[in-house]
Amino acid sequence: MGGGGGKDGGGGMAAQAGRLGVVASVAFNLAALAFYLRRRYFGGDDAAAARKKAEAEVPPSSGKPPVTKDSIINLDHGDPMMYEAFWRGGAGERATIVIPGWQTMSYFSDVGSLCWFLEPGLEREVRRLHRLVGNAVADGYHVLVGTGSTQLFQAALYALSPPGPSAPMNVVSPAPYYSSYPAVTDFLKSGLYRWAGDAKMFDGDTYVELVCSPSNPDGGIREAVLKSGDGVAVHDLAYYWPQYTPITSAAAHDIMLFTVSKCTGHAGTRLGWALVKDRAVAQKMSKFIELNTIGVSKDSQLRAAKILKAITDGYDRAAGAAAAGDDDDDSSGRLFHFARRKMVSRWAKLRAAVAASGIFTLPDELPGHCTFANETVSAYPPFAWLRCGKEGVDDLEGYLRERKIISRGGGKFGADGRVVRISMLDTDEAFAIFVDRLAAMN
Amino acid sequence: MGGGGGKDGGGGMAAQAGRLGVVASVAFNLAALAFYLRRRYFGGDDAAAARKKAEAEVPPSSGKPPVTKDSIINLDHGDPMMYEAFWRGGAGERATIVIPGWQTMSYFSDVGSLCWFLEPGLEREVRRLHRLVGNAVADGYHVLVGTGSTQLFQAALYALSPPGPSAPMNVVSPAPYYSSYPAVTDFLKSGLYRWAGDAKMFDGDTYVELVCSPSNPDGGIREAVLKSGDGVAVHDLAYYWPQYTPITSAAAHDIMLFTVSKCTGHAGTRLGWALVKDRAVAQKMSKFIELNTIGVSKDSQLRAAKILKAITDGYDRAAGAAAAGDDDDDSSGRLFHFARRKMVSRWAKLRAAVAASGIFTLPDELPGHCTFANETVSAYPPFAWLRCGKEGVDDLEGYLRERKIISRGGGKFGADGRVVRISMLDTDEAFAIFVDRLAAMN
């Protein structure tokens, strides 16, 4: 219009009209511009939204303090801090959760369902993730949620123990077994079940066998060793994920336990799930969780659902990009690719350090065809089962402690003192200092 | 500038320059306007921020389905849905929490502390809330966190039971006692402790007495009835909050249990805390939670901290406004005022319905001076302990069930069948239908 005002070479009515129009137009445009600038630079909706978000974020606890060259390095627990870098990236943004003050106040998630405290959104994402990874059959199974898989393990013991005044059920697992199994089984001196030790030494007929595969502590692939009598097996599949081991088939056992701690790295969320075939067993396991903690935190369930969704969505996006021919190897949104790369490089460093030292040995690498990666890959367990051959070192845990490395001694796993379990999932900094110190021992 | 272009009456260089300037200016302004409009209406930062927030919110589960005039009304559990209206208001906005994907991944909150899985921010807000309300002494006490107070109750039994192979510790509580105490004490047939029934009937020397005050189910104020021998008391103060009972003094017992469920209404968050005097007992209680669930969900802890902060901040703001002379009775930010108003009106409706019916009785109102409200107020318990005097009604729970009201029968509390416990904390809709039905019974 201003241009039109210029066209007739000035003067006359048209030009006047043009100029008036220009005045009006410019005035309006300047007002709009000023309004836009105020909003943009002096705090409009978006600045306010950012402020609100900042207020709503709660400063997290320090967790473990950062390490230095001279620190004691604590690799006793499998604290999965290795994963933080992934969740600080683009995927983490998509896993952010907002919980309004009024949400999930009820005890109940779905009054009608067998597991009345299970958030339907979490069940959906659990089934979706298993479909993606192919590590377990979820169709035809009941999904239960627990405060970590530790609670679900106790729920399974409760559900599988005979009612009435019979002798306690024997709980066994082939040595080396997860060090928590005996402690958690016996700490309340239950009359329903009792720890009965190494499954390979057991010859009774009534028992629950705990099958941890891949095995904590040694990473081995396990099957139930006891098949006799009225025995039942509980399969702890916390580590049956593609970053740790080839996914050779979809597991389909009666009771299978999983946890976000070792799948996504969110140990602090205390969230596990079970896939249970038998309805009556699933009901008794739910009953245990009702009596023990009246259900499971809904905040944790909503967050876990968001996290699992971010993982599966990441692979869907990558598949979409590949289909569109846009096939770069960007793994920023692919959790299992990120974690496997970390495990490969950490195990290479550890084996190099062990070779440099000369006094240690590790289990051999176990290769297999992974249906998820669709290639033959090695296992890279979340724990190193480290043995020392040095003369006079009968207490390897103590030997390492003197060298400021905290590990968990073989005795706690039903093994000897010349072997320890060491977490492979801590921060890059802690792991680097650990391998340096190990390489220098001889 | 367009105006300037007009000043010289058209023609000449000035006018030309003016017109060119106008063209440039208008072009620039239009571009800015277009840019602003695109951002404003076709998704700029603020629209994107809103979208992100929407994506980050997870649709909550239905909880319990809404009720209709003919519904079965379930008042068996103390599902605290009454509080949702408060958290949907202004205070709720301030209690919203955002948890980024990378936050609180570690098992550990504070490696050095006695309760290594307790978020320091939660401990801070717990102590701050007790200072505000004055219902318990927190200074000089260890703060422990649990997956609801139910887990802390079991932790206390574990911590107080003698080690070694002695007979199980006797667990008692004066009838009527909370129906979960016997079930939770005995469900694992622990060799450490066993339910021994009504404290008033107990005459041994070694025991743990559970003191629930105000009492679930009957709202009475309780003190330990057993003082003899080596007995220890655990004080369950879940209901010792000003909306339910006058705060007559700051409790200072050896072990005191609290939960957000009945304080703020967030039952689904499964978050409780304990104030414990003795360090060794606090350590053993922490050990129980470590063995049972390897700590407590950090997401729940961060959320609970945010919620408790919103409550205390609300009272600080109100105090500030009052000091500034701006003294309206707006309780939109004051949780205990909101909840007390609800309880007062619900109890008035219930007593009117009981009077209209003529076949029921309720405990008498217990007035007292509340140091928090700084006035004499009545108790308005979270449960109604409803007794029926009608000829032939020996199973009141069954009698009410036939009338589509689910309650919890006296037998489960160590009382007779002519009395039931009814939750006073459900939705307004469910409560209204309940009192209407009750008034019509005769």
Image (cartoon, coloured by chain):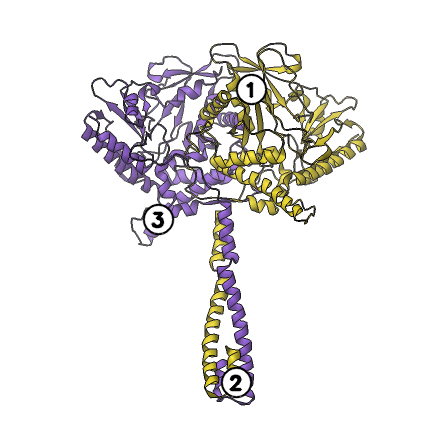
Chain colours: A yellow, B purple
Within 10 Å of disc 1 (Cα), the crowding (few <14, some 14-19, many 20+) is many
Q: Point out residue B182 in the picture as x, y percentages from the top left corner.
A: 40, 19
- Residue A185, numbered circle: 1
Residue identifier under label 2: A8
The structure residue drawn at horizontal position 40% and vertical position 34%, both measured from the top left corner, is B261
Chain for disc number 3: B
Nearest the eye: A326 or B115:
A326
Nearest the eye: A9 or A222:
A9
- Kindly check if marks 1 and 3 are in contact, taking CB atoms under 8 A apart as contact: no
Closer to viewer: mark 1 or mark 2: 2
Within 10 Å of disc 2 (Cα), the crowding (few <14, some 14-19, many 20+) is few
Mark closest to the chain's N terminus, 1 or 2? 2
- Residue B318, numbered circle: 3
Query: What amino acid does circle 2 point to?
Result: Asp
Chain for disc number 1: A
**Residue A70 quadrant:** top right
Q: Point out residue A340 in the picture as x, y percentages from the top left corner.
A: 69, 37
Query: What amino acid does circle 1 point to?
Result: Thr
Q: Tell me the distance, in whole angstroms, between the alpha carbons under discs 1 and 2.
A: 96 Å
Query: What amino acid does circle 3 point to?
Result: Ala
Q: Point out residue B168 in the picture as x, y percentages from the top left corner.
A: 46, 14
Chain for disc number 2: A
Horizontally, residue B26 falls left or right of residue B222, namely right
